[in-house]
Image: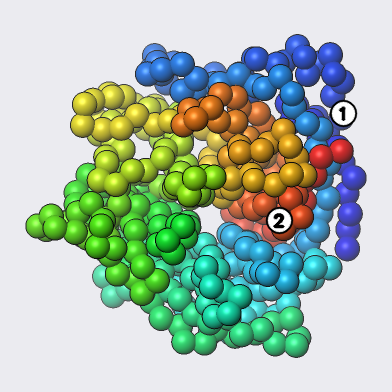
Amino acid sequence: MKRLSLLLACTAISSALISAPTLAQNANQPAETGRANAPNQKPAFENQTRAPQPASIPKIATEVVAEGLPHLWAMEFLPDGRMLVTAKQGAMHIISEEGEAGPAIAGVPKVAFGGQGGLLDVALAPDYATSGMIFFSFSEPRQDGNGTSVASAKLVADDNGGGKLENVNVIFRQTPAYDGRSHFGSRLTFGPANELYVTVGERSDREPRVQAQELGSGLGKVFRIDMNGKALPDNPFVNTEGAQPEIWSLGHRNMQSAALDGQGRLWTVEHGPRGGDELNRPEPGKNYGWPEVTYGVEYSGSAVGKGITENAQTEQPVYYWDPVIGPSGMAFYDGDAIPEWKNAFLVGGLVSQGVVVLHMDGDRVAHEERVPLDARIRDVKVGPDGAVYAVTEQRGGGQSTIIKLTKT
């Protein structure tokens, strides 16, 4: 298996080691210095965007632990240290501790592969050690189009490094369906009471995306369900006529990042328009604005809707990026191997091609640092050893690699 000892400093695109004086010069300066896509838009409060870099930035070593993999979308550590991964075209594999991919796991349902669609996230049930149950999201082909769905199954591994899914059951379907290839989301995150948060997209096109503001539609929402796919009785809209009872929050664009913080609260990062990627802490019943209130502009450069960034009915993002990082995969760092990152959020960047580290002060971002990896990062996980693991992808498909990040 190929091993790399490349040393990366978190504030440079170069792979060369950066000296302490250079780090000191960059301290308290923003990691992002590129030209804004929406330069006339101003943040609502200090450090809502372009937060300064921290004074202490660790030097990070990277090591390839698995390569030559199919185009991956997500990974999850199994209790024995192996990794369960999802390949976008519709396969699951178990990656051995030696970095070898086993045969495709049997029983994965058909996915609507194409564009941004395919087999998406995977999460272990809270009682996986005894039940063997997993949950996964995928773009499901339907008679009237496609949509993001969530299924549960029992993972039964075999002696050849593969296995099968038993009792596959689609427990939740985002509705309405739409005949499109974009903005499926999605991430799956279990809360402290075994509730399952499901993030989805609003399907991108102008016609469906307005439904992110509609409680009768499942587009552009965070859902909160039990392990059978049912709405929790204390969800905010269970008694609202015409509303989908599974909805937790609304007004989202395309959420491909989700993680719990140290208090067990859900945080998400969503793809925004040009100059509008944003970090949120979705709260029950609250509206996060899209597509009526947002930072950033359309891909054409024109204003989104009326071009407003705030109103009294919608929530401000905790943080936003202009230009965008292209967020995907997210983890809360609670390990000890990289103490400078303790209690920080780690966000994979597709466009920024690295890991973005958000150091928090309460519920606000205090500092932002960048770990350049010269690769599109699709998922980020904290391993049982406290190291950080990042899944890369090639634009348009191709092979993926899993990289381990440690402090030198």
The quarter of the rendered structure image containing the C terminus is top right
* Side of 395 where 229 appears, left or right: left
Q: Could you tell me how far apart the alpha carbons at marks 1 and 2 are, in whole angstroms?
A: 25 Å
Judge the density around disc 1: few (<14), some (14-19), many (≥20) Cα neighbours within 10 Å.
some
Residue at the outermost left position: 241
**10 Å crowding of disc 2: few (<14), some (14-19), many (20+):** some
The image shows residue 176, relative to residue 307, as above or below, that is below
Q: In which quadrant of the rendered image does the N terminus lie?
A: bottom right
Kindly check if marks 1 and 2 are in contact, taking CB atoms under 8 A apart as contact. no
Which of the two residues, 303 or 49, is positioned nearer the viewer here?
49
Note whether residue 310 is visible: yes
Can you give x and y, in whole percent of width and height, for residue 368 in the image? 61, 27
The residue that mark 2 highlights is: 383
**In the image, what residue type sits under mark 1?**
Leu
Residue 237 position within the rendered picture, expressed as x and y whole percent measured from the top left: 19, 54
The amino acid type, in three-letter code, at marker 2 is Gly
In depth, the one of 265 and 119 nearer the eye is 265
Image point 78% across, 61% down: which residue? 66
Please tell me whether mark 1 sits on a helix, a strand or a loop: loop
Tell me where residue 397 sits by quadrant. bottom right
Above or below 112: residue 375: above
According to the image, label 1 marks what residue? 17
Q: Residue at x 33, y 43 (%)?
A: 283
* Figure check: 194 above or below 351: below
Give the residue at x 53% y 73%. 127
- Residue at figure coordinates x 46%, y 57% from the top left: 192
Tag count:
2
In the rendered image, residue 350, in percent from the top left (x then y), is placed at 59, 43
